[in-house]
Image (cartoon, helix red, strand yellow):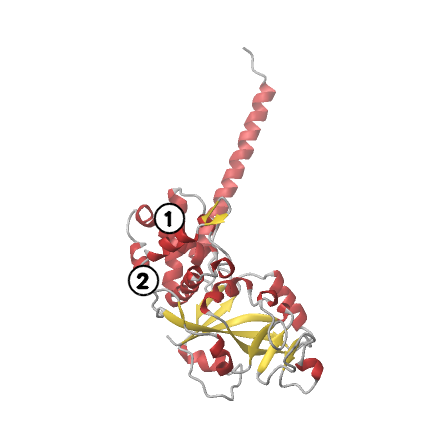
């Protein structure tokens, strides 16, 4: 049987191209490994999508999780506690967004299996220690997969602990007239990449000043708030009109954030109350009770009249962005 040399040359070229592609892919992966281990000024961690259970990918997953826990255990603990609070509410279908895809079977959310998985997860400090053990994934693979999804795969936006000496600087962003207890903890919320909504917010803000205000909500709502922000369409119609309610006073927002049960293994405490500190654009679509102008203090669908003093009513979700969490009543 005779072989066509041109066919052989073509096959060799095809194989060479394939080798080049594999080499390029390998170089890219090595570059990602470097970025995973490299710390930036804002503690941003770049993580590749890890769906494989190959030894190399499992090791990357373990190392990424260790890095997150080592750098800021309290921030990781808060994010995990908010996730658990959203899991355990009867309103999980609304609150638990995004939902871990590994617990979706035939397009149905297996919330009971997820809750059982959460129940056996020990404190994160314990997890950090066992991550150094050999064959840790064989023993705790389900735990590692879930924690990795919440803390690493959902890395954006990231949560960062604020030092206590900086609390006054944060709280002075909203001058308060009411006496209220100082938050136990404050966390910064920031994005590692520019999103469409953030681009839009910055574009609108170019022609206006900005200011800060507090927003109170139930603990189980904050998992979705972290990832999707405060959304007007998620708010029920209220006395002074439909929209997002905020206040210039921490004491006014506190009653809207009752103490809720987060996670029993948390270093922050199993019961907590969270308040969001948001930056708002001073725009006509934000109604304020402190304005004497009816156009700025009342909306058309209000049944209660003017927005009360110390309150802001945001009728356009694009005008607010989450900046800080204050953690109360630990």
Judged left or right of residue 161, residue 283 is right
Task: State the image quarter where residue 232 is shown.
Answer: bottom right
Residue 215: % across, % down: 53, 75
Residue 120 vs 256, above or below: the answer is above
Secondary element type, mark 1:
helix
Residue 189 vs 308, above or below: the answer is above
Q: Which residue lies furthest to the front in this view?
A: 303
Residue 240: % across, % down: 62, 77
Q: Residue 188 carries which label?
A: none
Please name whichever residue, 241 or 186, is drawn nearer the observer in this view of the structure. 241
Task: State the image quarter where residue 187 is shown.
Answer: bottom left
Please name whichever residue, 328 or 87, is drawn nearer the observer in this view of the structure. 87
Judged left or right of residue 144, residue 189 is right
Residue 308: % across, % down: 60, 83
Name the image quarter holding the N terminus. Answer: top right
Q: Which residue was labeled with disc 1?
A: 59
Q: Mark 1 vs mark 2: give the one in front.
A: 2
Query: Could you tell me which residue is drawn at 53 percent across and 37 percent down?
Result: 20
Please name whichever residue, 78 or 31, is drawn nearer the observer in this view of the structure. 78
Residue 302: % across, % down: 66, 77
Q: Which residue was labeled with disc 2?
A: 125
Judged left or right of residue 17, residue 92 is left
The crowding category of the residue bearing disc 1, from other C-alpha atoms within 10 Å (few below 14, some 14 to 19, many at least 20), is some
Name the image quarter holding the C terminus. Answer: bottom left
């Amino acid at each position: 049987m005779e072989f066509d040399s041109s066919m052989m040359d073509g096959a060799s070229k095809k194989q060479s191209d394939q080798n080049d592609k594999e080499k390029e892919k390998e170089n890219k992966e090595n570059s990602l490994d470097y970025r995973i281990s490299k710390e930036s000024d804002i503690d941003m961690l770049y993580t590749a999508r890890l769906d494989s259970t190959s030894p190399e990918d499992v090791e990357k997953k373990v190392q990424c999780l260790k890095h997150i826990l080592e750098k800021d255990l309290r921030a990781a603990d808060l994010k995990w506690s908010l996730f658990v609070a959203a899991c355990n509410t009867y309103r999980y279908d609304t609150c638990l967004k995004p939902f871990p895809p590994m617990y979706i079977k035939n397009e149905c959310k297996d919330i009971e299996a997820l809750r059982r998985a959460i129940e056996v997860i020990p404190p994160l400090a314990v997890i950090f220690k066992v991550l150094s053990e050999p064959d840790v994934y064989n023993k705790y693979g389900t735990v590692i997969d879930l924690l990795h999804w919440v803390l690493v795969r959902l890395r954006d936006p990231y949560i960062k602990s604020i030092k206590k000496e900086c609390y006054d600087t944060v709280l002075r962003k909203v001058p308060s007239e009411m006496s209220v207890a100082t938050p136990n903890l404050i966390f910064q919320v920031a994005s590692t990449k520019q999103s469409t909504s953030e681009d839009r917010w910055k574009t609108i803000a170019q022609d206006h000043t900005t200011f800060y205000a507090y927003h109170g909500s139930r603990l189980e709502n904050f998992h979705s708030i972290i990832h999707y922000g405060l959304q007007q369409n998620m708010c029920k119609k209220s006395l002074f009109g439909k929209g997002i309610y905020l206040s210039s006073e921490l004491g006014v927002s506190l009653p809207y954030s009752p103490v809720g049960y987060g996670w029993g293994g948390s270093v922050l405490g199993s019961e907590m109350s969270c308040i969001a500190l948001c930056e708002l654009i001073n725009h006509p679509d934000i109604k304020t009770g402190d304005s004497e102008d009816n156009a700025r203090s009342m909306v058309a669908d209000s049944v209660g009249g003017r927005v009360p003093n110390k309150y802001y009513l945001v009728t356009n979700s694009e005008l607010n962005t989450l900046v800080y969490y204050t953690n109360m009543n630990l």
